């Protein structure tokens, strides 16, 4: 009765399960095996794994999983592999293999192995589409930024000399004898405008001349914490509290450029401070998964309108009264150069959340 119940349970599973003895003879296969691999238990038992799987060269990687388990006694906790069923087509399978051991008179001996295969074709296809979409998006963003950099460098060069001349002549007007106060006032305004224009040129050149990434092994948590501490002075001017939440593992290290990342995080904090009301709070949180570290900056300010959201990372786009729109553009470029990504969630009237994700192993070649 117990055996029947166990078989019924195994037959009801969505995964293919194959059990062999130590010689590789198939002792059991559940019903899902026919749907996933294209062979029934009777076929596997009568013809054997060799006649069923090892006759197709396309299934070489799949066969290695079985070969390593049966003859090399090497099992895999988790492996993804392509599989070509007998009726044609192609599937993506998640494979797990494990030993079957038996204890007898205090001794444990190997008696076979269990292989579990799950059909992840649909999930894998969606992952590949998402990966391609992200790669295409990053490529377009990089090409766009490079084109803007060339344009920005040319414009900055052409603007700087006239700005210097305007400022110089305005200074001479102020120093000339006989000019009335109205003329001097106008000259001061000309100088103020020239300085703002020169500051804009400096920011454009800073963005266009962004240095190459110099990745080292460091703690993104430490860099983020240092940046938060440095920005507390500006936040205090508006009585804003910066709240740092660290849920990452201790002593976590990644490969990135600490100086560049400090600029990126600083820009996000500055943006949050600018759009936060007096006496409010800004949450900075950092955590990680198996592949990347995620840092978020959440403010509770005016938020970003839906019509403006797609433009926030564009150079020169800003909703600030005196903003240049270069800060978030620089941040996005730094994140992209690290092989990461930046995301924005915002609700008008309730604030914005900027989230950057940086891979632990930054192996991208920078040129």
Image (spheres, rainbow, N blue to C red):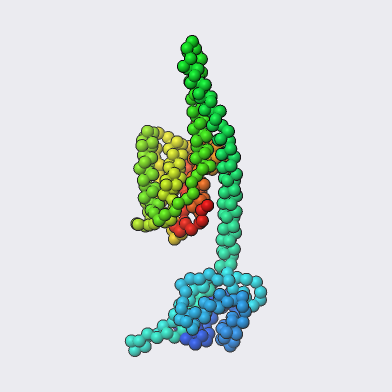
Residue 185 visible, this angle: no
Image location (x, y in percent) of residue 115: 50, 77
- Considering every residue shown, the one lying at the far left of the view is 106
Choose between 234 and 278: the one closer to the eye: 234
| Residue 298 falls in image quadrant | top left
Q: Is the residue 195 above or below the residue 268 in the image?
A: above
Image location (x, y in percent) of residue 260: 45, 47
Residue in the picture at 38% in, 40% down: 231
- 228 displayed left or right of 142: left
Residue 22 visible, this angle: yes
Residue in the picture at 40% in, 46% down: 284
Image location (x, y in percent) of residue 49: 56, 83
Q: Is the residue 190 above or below the residue 334 in the image?
A: above
Image location (x, y in percent) of residue 76: 47, 74
Choose between 14 and 22: the one closer to the eye: 22
Residue in the picture at 48% in, 58% down: 363
| Residue 293 falls in image quadrant | bottom left
Residue in the picture at 50% in, 71% down: 79
């Amino acid at each position: 009765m117990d055996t029947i119940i166990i078989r019924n349970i195994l037959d009801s599973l969505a995964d293919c399960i194959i059990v062999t003895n130590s010689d590789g003879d198939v002792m059991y296969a559940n019903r899902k095996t026919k749907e996933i691999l294209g062979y029934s238990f009777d076929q596997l038992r009568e013809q054997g794994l060799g006649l069923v799987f090892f006759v197709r060269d396309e299934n070489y990687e799949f066969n290695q999983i079985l070969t390593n388990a049966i003859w090399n006694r090497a099992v895999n906790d988790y492996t993804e592999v392509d599989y070509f069923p007998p009726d044609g087509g192609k599937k993506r399978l998640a494979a797990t293999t494990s030993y079957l051991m038996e204890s007898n008179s205090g001794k444990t001996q190997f008696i076979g192995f269990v292989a579990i295969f799950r059909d992840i074709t649909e999930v894998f296809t969606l992952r590949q589409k998402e990966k391609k979409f992200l790669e295409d998006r990053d490529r377009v963003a990089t090409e766009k930024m490079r084109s803007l950099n060339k344009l920005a460098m040319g414009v900055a060069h052409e603007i700087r000399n006239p700005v210097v001349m305007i400022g110089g002549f305005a200074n001479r007007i102020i120093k000339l004898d006989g000019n009335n106060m109205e003329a001097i006032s106008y000259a001061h305004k000309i100088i103020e405008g020239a300085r703002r224009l020169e500051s804009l040129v400096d920011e454009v050149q800073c963005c266009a001349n962004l240095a190459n990434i110099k990745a080292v092994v460091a703690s993104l948590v430490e860099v983020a914490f240092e940046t938060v501490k440095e920005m507390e002075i500006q936040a205090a001017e508006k009585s804003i509290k910066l709240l740092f939440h660290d849920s990452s593992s201790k002593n976590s290290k990644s490969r990135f450029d600490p100086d560049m990342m400090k600029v990126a995080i600083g820009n996000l904090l500055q943006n949050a401070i600018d759009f936060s009301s007096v006496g409010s709070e800004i949450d900075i949180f950092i955590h990680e998964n198996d592949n990347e570290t995620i840092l978020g900056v959440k403010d509770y300010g005016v938020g970003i309108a839906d019509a403006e959201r797609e433009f926030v990372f564009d150079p020169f786009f800003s909703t600030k009264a005196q903003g240049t729109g270069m800060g978030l553009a620089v941040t996005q470029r730094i994140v992209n150069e690290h092989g990461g990504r930046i995301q924005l969630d915002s609700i008008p009237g309730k604030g914005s959340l900027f989230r950057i994700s940086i891979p632990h192993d930054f192996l991208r070649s920078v040129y």
